Amino acid sequence: MQSASEAGAEWICQVEGLRMSFERRLIQTHVSFGVRRGEIFTIMGPSGCGKSTLLRHMIGLLRPKLGCIRFGDLDYWNATAEQQDAVRRRFGVLFQGSALFSAMTLSENVALPLQLYTEANAVERRALVRYKLGLVGLRGYEEYYPSEISGGMRKRAGLARALALDPELLFLDEPSAGLDPVSSRRLDDLILQLRDGTGASFVVVSHELASLFAIGDDGIFLDADSKRPIAHGSPKDMLAHCDHPTVQAFLRREAVKDAGTHDAVVHHE
């Protein structure tokens, strides 16, 4: 992995020599990459390769077996609990199912991080919630419940909650999953607008090719067979320059031939 000085960019997050496993089952090893400030970094690969598991390691839900994850100069897994808590407040997370609380209105969902982590009073919170929902095109839906809006709107509401504390880094797990092509494209456009408007960095787990090509500035490809990264770069660069058959099969939605006599189809999450 290049250093920040070599790349001419500021790293907001660096993953170094990560090894992920559950008991005796190896998920991925030798995972190293950096996320630059203001870029959209994509995590790609076929089903079962460990994309979402890597994301959970990065947001502090799973401790790696080896390696480190740095936010700035802080080694997260060797930091104190107080330092870890301070780092977590600097990033937002959109889980695959949006993870909105069904018994809360959109306003209450977005206000929750403000109640937990800021000293903003009720008037200030209401103003901030309206602003965050407005950022994602949901102004006027403050008092709606998640069950009363579409899947695409729930994704945007989840994104508004992830933005509540003005994070410098956002983690999105399959943001386009379950959306129709039009809603997916709108969400891609929104992610680009938020990146350009706020300067925040994004780490996006996705298997949706249209989204990967539309938003990815850089990325890493995790291989399910070798259990290590086999390509690094933007999705467009991988398609144009990486000759690994698994990468090409994934990015072109083709079949890849295994070591035997049959063709094996690359499946996707």
Image (spheres, rainbow, N blue to C red):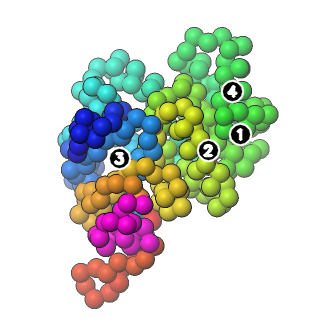
Q: Could you say which disc has been placed on residue 137 in the image? A: 1
Q: CA distance from mark 4 to mark 1?
A: 10 Å
> Which residue has dot 4 on it?
131
Residue beneath disc 3 = 54
Q: Residue at x 25, y 57 (%)?
A: 228
Residues marked 1 and 2 touching at CB (< 8 Å): yes
For residue 91, side relative to residue 152 (left or right)? left
> Residue at the spot x=29%, y=32% of the render?
70
The reply to whether discs 3 and 2 touch (Cβ–Cβ < 8 Å) is no
Give, as a single range, the part of the protein colored magenta: 236-252
Q: Earlier in the sequence, mark 1 or mark 2?
A: 1
Rate crowding at label 3 as few (under 14), some (14 to 19) or many (20 or more) other CA atoms within 10 Å: many
Q: CA distance from mark 4 to mark 3?
A: 32 Å
- Where is residue 125? Give x, y as percent: 67, 18
Asked if marks 4 and 1 touch (Cβ < 8 Å), the reply is no
Label 4 amino acid? Answer: Tyr
Task: Say what amino acid the circle numbered 3 marks.
Answer: Leu
Residue at (54, 24) in percent of width and height: 165
Q: Secondary structure at mark 1?
A: loop
Q: Mark 2 highlights which residue?
A: 190
Which amino acid is tagged 2?
Leu
User: Crowdedness of circle 2 by 10 Å Cα count: few (<14), some, many (20+)?
Assistant: some
At label 1, the amino acid type is Gly
Q: In which quadrant of the rendered image does the N terminus lie?
A: top left
SS class of the residue under badge 2? Answer: helix
Name the mark nearer the viewer: 3 or 2: 2
Question: Secondary structure beneath disc 4?
Answer: helix
Residue 110 figure quarter: top right
Q: CA distance from mark 1 to mark 2?
A: 9 Å
